[in-house]
């Protein structure tokens, strides 16, 4: 049950959402932050630790220097902040009695956890899990049946690292590209030096009308078919013509 409430606390906004960089001490936990839950029967006579709302108390920046059970931590581990994010939750101390401790002595997090637990006043003290973003496409066709290739290469894991850059030009070597596809149409490269469909190699690169790529495979087939129909090929041995016809036509 404690884990369920702890997960809810994270969702409510604990401050780890903005910390998405690689962590120094534990890769899956936020550096310099600890959750601890004060026991229900614990009596701490200090602002921010009493039951119910207290006037003139900033629950996001409590005075940790006056808390006796935190003294072993405060005196040795460069505490920077103590907060009680969920003080407003009514009738549920599993959430309202949760505190967030922040400190600069990040490499001593295990020692700090031990000191908090040994105080006898906390139910638990835990590292703050690192919250990460995961990118999932909103394409309704994104599933293992229709786009199985993306699942084969674990594309989703790669997208969590980077979704690429518009400055990178990708060359596609395949049998076809649907240039009017909604995911591609706005990003297809256009050779502005070529005039579309005028039958002229405007940029003199050896390809006619290669404004958005070129169908090299079909071009070769057409050329070879023309060769096979030429007068010269008729003088070739019949076996040569048969092989070429079988392979290329």
Image (cartoon, rainbow, N blue to C red):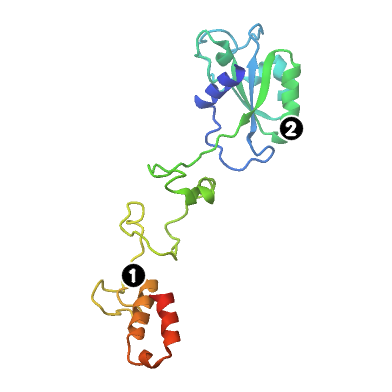
Which quadrant of the view contains residue 197? bottom left
Q: What residue did someone put label 1 on?
A: 191
Label 2 secondary element = helix
Q: Using a 10 Å C-alpha cutoff, classify the residue at mark 1 as few (fewer than 14 neighbours), some (14 to 19) or many (20 or more).
A: some
* In this picture, residue 46 sits left or right of residue 235: right
* Picture layout, residue 83 above or below residue 241: above
Q: Residue at x 75, y 22 (%)?
A: 115
Q: How many marks?
A: 2
In this view, the residue in front, 6 or 136, is: 136
Q: Quadrant of residue 223?
A: bottom left
Q: Which residue is mark 2?
A: 108
Q: Residues within 10 Å of mark 2 (few under 14, many from 20)?
A: some
Q: Secondary structure at mark 1?
A: loop
In front of the other: 57 or 177: 177
Q: Position of residue 169 (x, y in %)?
A: 43, 63
Q: Is residue 152 above or below residue 249?
A: above
Q: Nearer the viewer, residue 146 or 88?
A: 146
Q: Position of residue 228 (x, y in %)?
A: 36, 84
172 with respect to 21 (left or right): left
Q: Is residue 149 visible?
A: yes
At x 30%, y 74%, the residue is 209
* Mark drawn on residue 176: none
In which quadrant of the rendered view does residue 196 lie?
bottom left
Eyeballing the image, is 105 above or below 157?
A: above
């Amino acid at each position: 049950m404690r884990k369920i409430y702890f997960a809810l606390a994270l969702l409510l906004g604990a401050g780890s959402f903005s910390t998405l960089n690689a962590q120094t001490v534990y890769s899956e936990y936020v550096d310099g932050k600890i959750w601890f839950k004060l026991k229900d029967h614990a009596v701490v006579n200090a602002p921010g630790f009493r039951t119910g709302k207290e006037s003139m108390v900033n629950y996001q920046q409590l005075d940790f220097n006056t808390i006796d059970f935190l003294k072993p931590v405060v005196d040795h581990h460069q505490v920077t902040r103590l907060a009680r994010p969920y003080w407003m939750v009514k009738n549920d101390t599993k959430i309202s009695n949760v505190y967030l401790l922040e400190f600069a002595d990040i490499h001593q997090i295990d020692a700090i956890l031990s000191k908090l637990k040994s105080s006898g006043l906390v139910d638990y003290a835990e590292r703050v899990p690192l919250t990460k973003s995961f990118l999932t496409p909103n394409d309704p066709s994104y599933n293992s049946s229709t786009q199985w290739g993306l699942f084969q290469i674990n594309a989703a894991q790669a997208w969590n690292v980077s979704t690429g850059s518009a400055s990178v030009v990708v060359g596609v070597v395949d049998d076809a590209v649907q240039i009017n596809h909604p995911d591609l149409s706005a990003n297809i490269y256009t050779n502005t030096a070529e005039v579309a469909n005028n039958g002229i190699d405007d940029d003199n690169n050896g390809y006619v009308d290669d404004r958005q790529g070129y169908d090299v495979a079909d071009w070769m087939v057409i050329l070879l078919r023309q060769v096979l129909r030429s007068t010269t090929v008729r003088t070739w041995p019949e076996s040569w013509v048969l092989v070429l016809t079988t392979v290329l036509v």
